[in-house]
Structures are given as structure tokens and as C-alpha cells.
């Protein structure tokens, strides 16, 4: 089961249904993806709650009764991983979107990975 794809689907569906927030099971990878979404301005915030079963709550952002996230897509899947070198890091919508990568230096955006000269696994595209 692909938990990252499940999280992205929850965010996509809640964004289209104009729900104010999404609650998913916590993992460090999901928390880092939520951090990047907050850093890039796609969500208004996120928080972790719970002791034994941690949950990640993501607060979505809206503008004029429309979600700020126009699209979110899982790229690398468990059945087919997508790894890229630093020269091959994709630009989403010509630089208007964000590629989220899992690198040896942690979960980074495509631009941060280019700046640090590190490649990795392309997790998702957000625009």
C-alpha cells in the first residue's frame, strides 16, 4: 500500500471539496512533504497530534472559493521508482509548480536539490 499516494489523494479530494483540513496517519516522510507544501505556500499549516497513533493534520489554503493547489500528482510509485540525477530534476509547469524529491540530504524541493547538487527519488509534483 502506498501511504504517500493515499495522503496526496486525501489532500486532492479535500481541496476539491473545499474542506478546511485533512487528517492522515503520521509518518516522517508525510510530515516532510507537508512541511514543503507549507514552505511553498500551498497549505496554511500542519500539526502532529496523538501519542501512540500519531496523526498529521494539514490545513488547506483557499483563494476565492477555489483551492490554492491546482493539481498534485504522485510520480514515483512502489512498483516503479523514478530516480533522477541533479541534471535531470524536472521543472513542473516551467517553474510554476514544485517537484518534491527524497534525497540523501532529506526531502527537498526540486530547486533546493539543484542548489545542493543532489539527485534522488521524485516523490510528487504540485502546481
Image (cartoon, rainbow, N blue to C red):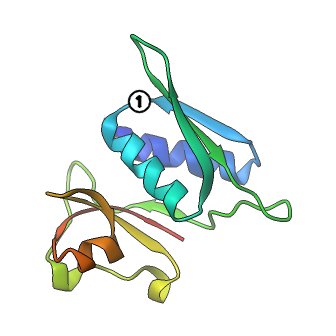
The quadrant in which the C terminus is found is bottom right
Q: What residue appears at the point 52 percent right and 47 percent down from the top-left corner?
A: 9
Residue found 74% across the figure and 47% down from its top = 17
* Residue ID at (41%, 51%): 33
**Among all residues in the image, which is located at the extreme top?**
52
Total marks in image: 1
Measured from the top left, where is residue 77 in percent x and y? 27, 53
Circle 1 residue: 26
The x and y percentages for residue 100 are 36, 63
Return the x and y of residue 13 as percentages of the image width and height.
63, 47
Q: Quadrant of the N terminus?
A: top left
Image coordinates for residue 50, horizontal then vertical, percent: 48, 16
Q: Tell me: 31 left or right of 82.
A: right
Q: Above or below — where is 123 with respect to 5?
A: below
Q: Quadrant of residue 29?
A: top left
Q: Quadrant of residue 41?
A: bottom right
Residue 82's image quarter?
Answer: bottom left
Q: Nearer the viewer, residue 5 or 111?
A: 111
The answer to whether residue 33 is above or below residue 46 is: below
| Secondary structure beneath label 1 | loop
Amino acid at each position: 500500500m502506498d501511504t504517500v499516494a493515499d495522503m496526496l489523494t486525501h489532500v486532492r479530494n479535500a481541496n476539491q471539496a473545499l474542506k478546511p483540513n485533512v487528517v492522515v496517519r503520521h509518518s516522517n516522510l508525510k510530515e516532510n512533504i507537508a512541511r514543503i507544501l507549507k514552505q511553498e505556500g500551498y497549505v496554511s499549516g500542519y500539526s502532529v497530534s496523538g501519542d501512540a497513533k500519531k496523526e498529521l493534520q494539514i490545513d488547506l489554503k483557499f483563494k476565492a472559493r477555489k483551492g490554492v493547489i491546482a493539481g498534485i500528482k504522485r510520480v514515483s510509485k512502489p512498483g516503479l521508482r523514478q530516480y533522477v540525477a541533479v541534471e535531470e530534476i524536472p521543472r513542473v509547469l516551467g517553474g510554476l509548480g514544485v517537484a518534491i524529491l527524497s534525497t540523501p540530504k532529506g526531502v527537498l524541493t526540486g530547486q533546493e536539490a539543484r542548489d545542493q547538487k543532489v539527485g534522488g527519488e521524485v516523490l510528487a509534483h504540485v502546481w
